[in-house]
Image: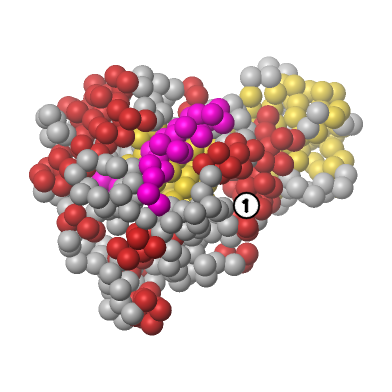
Amino acid sequence: MAMFETDPVRPEAYREFERPLPEWFRGAALGIFVHWGPYSVPAWAEPTGELGAVPRDEWYAHNPYAEWYANTMRIEGSPTHRHHEEVYGGAPYDDFLDAWKAEEFDADEVLAVVAATGARYFIPTTKHHDGVTLWDAPGTDGRNTVARGPGQDLIGAFADATRAAGLRFGVYYSGGLDWHFSDLPPIDHDGAPAPDDLAYAEYAHDHVIDLIDRYRPDILWGDIRWPAAGIEPGPKSIAHAFQRFYAQVPEGVVNDRWGESHWDFRTSEYVHGTAVEVGEAWENTRGIGLSFGHNRRETSEHLLSAHEAVLLLVDVVSRGGNLLLNIGLEASGRIPDLQRETLEGIGHWNRQYGHAVFGARPEERMPASDDPWMRWTRTDDAVHAVVDRNGHVELPDPHGLLDESSARIGEHPVIAERVDGAILVEVADATTPVAISFQPRD
């Protein structure tokens, strides 16, 4: 599959979908992801570490992803299994679906916070690995949020609010796993079984078609893989779904987690799969914390501060990618306070310096640095140095690319002096990274 593979090969049958990456996505810089489901009721996982930084032989039994609760609770001896027995008496997972009421959910309020970050697109989970759909998906026999739990079409509410806020709308769909439909043993090691049969492939196909027809998403964001029985082109294959998608949304994009098929852009996750972060058709995704789903056990020490999130955003954009930053809603529908603080801080920074990331490209002729922290981007009319330092800042300019007389911080001109192949700028009283912008000489 293409997911995390360094050099995936696109099958001949899927080459009809190859095309240039739409400009709206290439310059989007920031998207916001939301994981929300029955797992938001227990909202419990060990905050062990980032994907890619925790040893794989420990990952599944000590999974920091709260949205994997339905899997981890079934691994004998895992802390989540013990927690589930002690707190919920080993109750069936679907009890959480009925307990999930979303009583404070206001899609417009959530999207107001999201839009204030400056993000250009928004993607909610429509079906995660637990198989619960957040709309009345075909074939679910009432195991969805319209018939149970919240009692409403959450995806429709998100779609309407997203477009009203002026953002592009995407949908996440887990094609590679469905612990309810497949009834497979819990995953406790790499290479564990996943549903590959025709019945599941057709079931998942019908979901994706329904999402396309109902919501016309700008992004199809698959996860894990696609069932093998649905790869060969045919009337209920993922190829058919892509044909429907591009016919209805010509400027739409799909990611690389649809098995050995097609992708418009690559994805990495936390610090895993970073070898795909090359060129200008990739996206790094992660939670504000160590989990995508809301995790009550996470504290400020586990979450990105606004400062750290801004550095991550700038770093990703300076290397050619987009950042898809996730929030995990509480079961009630609220954005957790600490996550909201981070989002608001990102928005504050982008209102001052977003011109250095939105619509920006890497400026590869200028050297990045971690001491002081410095990254470079370029837009149509300026070159931007984003620097995380107060006081005396020395910007290397080995090629004489920058016009020092044009220097500004945000919208304010600043005195800059060229000395021995570098430009000296004084940054006063900055509490966040600053973007120092120049007119290029070329």
Picture coordinates of residue 151 (x, y %)?
37, 49
In front of the other: 84 or 289: 84
The image quadrant of residue 250 is top left
Picture coordinates of residue 59 (x, y %)?
37, 67
Residue at left 28%, top 69%? 92
The quadrant of the image that shows the N terminus is: top left
The quadrant of the image that shows the C terminus is: top right
Picture coordinates of residue 135 (x, y %)?
33, 43
Up-down relation of residue 4 to residue 73 (above or below): above
- In the rendered structure, does residue 40 fall within the stretch colored magenta? no
Which residue is the site of mark 1? 340
- In the rendered structure, does residue 161 fall within the stretch colored magenta? yes
In front of the other: 273 or 328: 328
Instruction: Check disc 1: other Cα within 10 Å, few if <14, some if 14-19, many if 20+.
Output: some
Please indicate, yes or no, whether residue 180 appears anywhere in the rendered image: yes
Residue at left 61%, top 30%? 358
Picture coordinates of residue 249 (x, y %)?
36, 22
Residue 319 left/right relative to 431: left
The image quadrant of residue 410 is top right
Please indicate, yes or no, whether residue 396 appears anywhere in the rendered image: no
Residue at left 81%, top 28%? 411
The image quadrant of residue 116 is top right
The kind of secondary structure element at disc 1 is helix
Residue at left 31%, top 34%? 211
Q: Which residues are magenta?
A: 150-176
> Hey, what amino acid is under mark 1?
Arg
